[in-house]
Amino acid sequence: MSAYRPPRIPSSEITPKGTYLNRRSFMAAAGGAALLPALPALAEKLTVKPGPYGTTEPQTPKDTVTSYNNFYEFGTNKGDPASNSAKFKPRPWTLEVGGMVAKPQTFDLDKLIADIPLEERIYRMRCVEAWSMVIPWDGFPLAALLDKVEPLGSAKYVAFETVVRPEEMPGQKGYFQPMPWPYVEGLRLDEARHPLTLLAVGLYGETLKNPNGAPIRLVVPWKYGFKGIKSIVKITLTDKQPPNSWNTLQANEYGFYANVNPEVDHPRWSQATERRIGGGSFFGGSEQRPTLPFNGYADEVASLYAGMDLRKFY
Amino acid sequence: MPLPKLSPRTREATIWALYAMGLIPGLWGFYQGATGQIPGDPVRIFEHMLGLWALRFLCLGLAVTPLRELAGVNLIAYRRALGLLAFYYVLAHFTVYLTLDRGLMFSTILADIVKRPYITLGMAGLVMLIPLAFTSNRWSIRRLGSDWNRLHKLVYPILIVAVLHYALSLKVVTGEPAFYLLVTALLLGYRLVRPRLLEARRRLRQASR
Ligand code: HEM
């Protein structure tokens, strides 16, 4: 099948980060809502060394990465997190890590960042809605944090929880709330310890902006984006499979594993292809491309699921 | 609330103005998308925008009768324009789906139409709109007589498949789709109570004579 055509836009034409700022004037004629994100000014430079698993695919422009997000705590439209997150305060921040561990601890985020060396990881990000980006994250492997608390032999899973702050997160208050809070996610311990699994504290060399899950979020590049829980306050090791929000909401559509899989469609739409969100000028220069098993990370992670029926454990 | 009486020439002009204004959001969206001014996923955003305007014009067209009968506002002269605008937006929405969205990959498009309930519903809406659009002219109305009325009742199932298509395309039903579901329920609900309402009015008028 000749479904895949390489992108028409050479990478040299991808809009460099920053130049988009003056293009934010698209008045969503769809509803009159202007996509005018009010990003907080705090974007500190991070000290980062290049990490493994890079890709040479063109990176999605920074401005697109920070203005097109699913983060329902700030609203359900893609532009909402950028427009509605100015009041959110990502500092000071503490992260509580406990459960089945030898040394439960509450970490001050800035101390943690000073303590663990940061790496740049350029990952593909595939949303369950069939679009994708390429994002240069800055962070550290989740395993490095787990080592600090020393999980017990009985621990089999890791549970994550997002902050609840209705006063700072408008999506968490009002009549029409799409899901119960806090947003929760989970991984099997071996998935959590996999070297690809990242806790990101920045992107493009700067601290995370609010729409992207400031100040600390999970990135699991072989899974659909909703596994990448944002603004994490609590991590708990447990022996039972923890609930994850989308699965709780619609179990027949969203599983616990949520591994990117072109063979297993969402009940209502195909997962065989995806649109890579780029930075071209004519309608973003975006094109459909085939979705790869495990989002292209099969060599690294397929063995984690040896013998499992991935149609059943979607 | 009677509207000011317009001369036929002025009324004609306002109808053309409605067409022109109605097409502005689509043309503007296309211009913005084509010049790289829509951040994020411009294809999806433009496609959604066209779908929403199609739905809006459908609802507006169906609001003409209740507005006349309940509020005494007669916009019947504009109904054909509203219906045709809805049709043009559905056509544009479908064209964007075929080209910018699916990149004319017909194998996946056919699979989509057959396998994805929300696409099947949207397609049903488009197919049903075609005969309505082609008979939205004076000649057809004269030619078809009472059949024209019967044919154009198709607009009710069209609205139903359109809102279902919308709701099913989403991960969760939020405020905006809920609003259109409600509007659909009101517009169609009115058609259910309408015969009784008109009958009651007629009796009232006779009694007061
Ligand atoms: C009566 C005809 C139709 C109406 C009124 C309509 C309306 C809509 C609306 C309101 C949306 C959602 C916009 C949003 O989420 O903001 C939508 C989405 C969509 N429609 Fe339609 N539509 C119609 C026919 C079609 C047809 C014929 C197709 C293609 C065969 C189609 C394909 C799509 C697609 C692909 C989406 C986007 C779903 C996604 O984001 O994944 N529609 N439509």
Image (cartoon, rainbow, N blue to C red):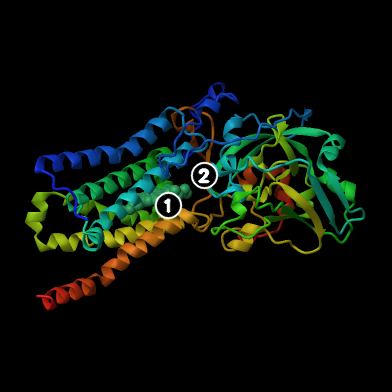
Q: Is residue A33 left or right of residue B27?
A: right
Q: Say which residue label 1 marks.
A: B112
Closer to the camera in the image, B202 or B115: B202
The outermost residue toward the front is B208
Queried on whether the Cβ of the residue with tag 1 lies below 8 angstroms from ligand 1, the answer reads yes
Closer to the camera in the image, A65 or A299: A65
- Within the image, what quadrant is residue B29 found in? top left
Looking at the image, which residue is at 83% across and 52% down? A97
The outermost residue toward the right is A102
Please, is residue A204 above or below residue A254 in the view? above
> Crowding near pointer 1: few (<14 within 10 Å), some, many (20+)?
some
Asked whether the beta carbons under mark 1 and mark 2 sit within 8 Å of each other, the answer is no
- Within the image, what quadrant is residue B27 found in? top left
Numbered disc 1: secondary structure: helix
Residue type, mark 2 in image: Thr
Q: Where does the image place residue B16, in percent across and percent down from the top left?
A: 19, 39
Q: Is residue B21 left or right of residue A218?
A: left
Looking at the image, which residue is at 67% across and 45% down? A298
**Disc 2: host chain:** A
What whole-number distance in Å separates the C-alpha atoms at marks 1 and 2? 12 Å
Q: Is residue A314 visible?
A: no
Q: Say which residue label 2 marks.
A: A273
Q: Where does the image place residue A34, in percent across and percent down from the top left?
A: 48, 38
Q: Is residue B24 left or right of residue A187?
A: left
